[in-house]
Structures are given as structure tokens and as C-alpha cells.
Image: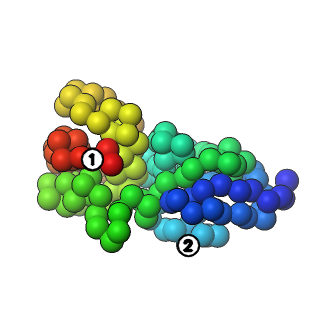
Amino acid sequence: MKRSVRFRLNGKPVALDTDDDRHLLWVLRTDLDLTGTKYGCGEGVCGACTVAVDGVAVRSCQTPLAAVEGKNVVTIEGIEHDGHLHPLQQAFMDHGGFQCGYCTSGMLMNAWAFLQKQPHPSRDAIVQEMDGNLCRCGAHQRIIAAIQEASVKGGAR
């Protein structure tokens, strides 16, 4: 059903007149030109499309736009602060937590949401949390190290 859907996106109010059954991924990429969120499997399995809705990591390829009405959505474009990388983004760079980079935004957003609720997790907790995000390049060990470092340096801000 086409109607006006309102939510906050990266701290700013958004109002769209569109079909509220459309998936959030496509609204972000095509309507709002935020292409950091990637299309991977389209089935909510790989995690490339992960964003945070009210602080919870969700698969935007499976999230209807109506589900974010009145909520706060944060994408990879929204975690930097005043032109500075988020500590988690910097840690990914420092540890080489990506190769091709395709999964990186989903990995970062899943880790970001996780660190919001558990700022100083154990390595085992990080591994368990990130298990649902896939990286075909095999950078998982570097990703885990980056998240560990970010948790020590304030990755939950």
C-alpha cells in the first residue's frame, strides 16, 4: 500500500511516499542514495545488508519499510562522527578486516549494534555474534581482532 512512511535515518527525519511493503534495502539504495548497505543473498542469510533499527541489527533485505515507521535507522553512512571514522571503522582499517570490502558495511553494522548492547564482550561472544555475517574472502580472524580492539577503544559510542 502506498503511503507516507516516516522514520529517522542516521539522526535525520525522513518521510517517503512509497509502498510500505518495499524492503528497506531498496529504499536506502534507490530512493535515498545510500549505497553503503549492500545486496548479498536477498534472503537475510549473508548479512551484507545489515543496518541497525532502534539499535538492533536487522537484515534490510528482509525488513519491510513499514517495520521502521517511527524508528531510528542507522546505516554505515551514519556511524562516523564529525567527519571522523567510528573507532570500529578505524579498527577494521588497522587490522585489514576486509579484502574485497563487499561484506564490510554489514559486518560493521552488526558489530556496531552488538557493541551498543555489550560494549566489552569476550572474544567468544564476538565470534558467536558475528557468526551470521559471511565473508567470502576469509577475513573473519581480522574482523574479530578489529572488533576486540574497538571494544577496548570505545567502539560503543
The disc, 1 or 2, on the residue closer to the chain's N-terminal end is 2
The amino acid beneath tag 2 is Asp
Judge from the rendering whether residue 40 lies leftward or rightward of residue 60; answer left or right. Answer: left
Residue 44 position, x and y percent, is: 52, 43
Judge from the rendering whether residue 98 lies leftward or rightward of residue 62; answer left or right. Answer: left
| Frontmost residue, 41 versus 109 | 109
* Residue 41 visible within the image: no
Residue 121 vs 63, above or below: the answer is: above
Residue 49 position, x and y percent, is: 48, 52
| Frontmost residue, 8 versus 38 | 8
Q: Residue at the location (51% across, 60% down)?
A: 10
Q: Residue at the location (73% across, 64% down)?
A: 16
- Please, what secondary structure does the residue beneath circle 2 have? loop
* Residue 18 visible within the image: yes
Q: Residues within 10 Å of mark 1 (few under 14, many from 20)?
A: many
| Frontmost residue, 136 versus 17 | 17
Q: Residue 33 bears which disc, if any? A: 2
The amino acid beneath tag 1 is Gly
Q: Which residue is mark 1?
A: 155
Residue 32 position, x and y percent, is: 60, 70
The scheme the figure's colours follow is: rainbow
Residue 111 image-quadrant placement: top left
Q: Residue at the location (33% across, 48% down)?
A: 157
Residue 86 image-quadrant placement: bottom left
Residue 90 position, x and y percent, is: 22, 59
